Image (spheres, rainbow, N blue to C red):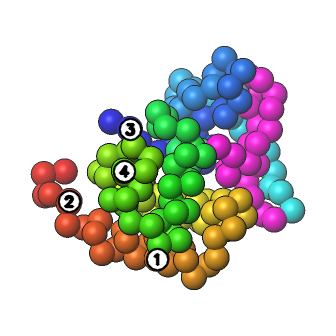
Amino acid sequence: MEKFAKAGDFCPNEDCPDFGQLQDDQKQQNLQKFGKTSKGVQRFRCKTCGKTFTETTGTIFFRKRTPEHEILETLALIAEGSRISSLSRVKGFKEDTIAQWVREAAEHMEQVEGVLLSEFKIERGQLDALWAYVRNKGEKKLSGNG
Ligand SMILES: [Zn+2]
């Protein structure tokens, strides 16, 4: 089961031996909180590699096979009004896959919005369209079997 890792759950440094190792209460404890940035974003330090990073570093689509940029670009296009069905054709992803990205992105709304606003020149009003998609369609597919 693919799942989003929470910010600060793992070391995002690909060269680190503990890269991608999720923090565990007992076993895996290489990350420590390391103050905050001037904007109040939690900073972490990996004891294994010594790198510091913030909770917004590379965590959004951790463990996805598709590159994060590709996913974010797809989300940006949805915000700009593209339909998932047409994006599916253009980009070659299954509609279900894209819909899943949107739903999962909604769970990390602040991070995703931050990236879309800053790197994809999406406007705040367009973000509503993206999240509206989640509200309208996200619930239909949930079955009670959890
Ligand atoms: Zn590390």
User: What label does residue 129 carry, if any?
Assistant: 1
Please give the label number shown on residue 89: 4
Q: Mark 2 or mark 3: name the one nearer the start of the chain.
A: 3
| Whole-number angstrom distance, CA of label 4 to CA of label 3 | 24 Å
Give the SS element for disc 2.
loop
Q: Nearer the viewer, mark 4 or mark 1?
A: 4
Observer-nearest of 144 and 64: 64
Inspect the image, locate mark 1, and give the three-letter code of the amino acid beneath it. Answer: Ala
Please state the extent of the stretch shown in magenta in the rendering: 39-58
Q: Is residue 49 magenta?
A: yes
Judge whether residue 131 can be spotted in this image.
yes
Q: Earlier in the sequence, mark 4 or mark 3?
A: 3
- The quarter holding residue 104 reads bottom left
Question: Badge 3 is on which residue?
Answer: 2
Amino acid type of the residue tagged 3 in the rendering: Glu
Disc 2 C-beta below 8 A from ligand 1: no
Disc 3 is placed on an element classified as: loop
Q: Residue at x 76, y 42 (%)?
A: 53
Find disc 2 in the rendering and name its residue: 142
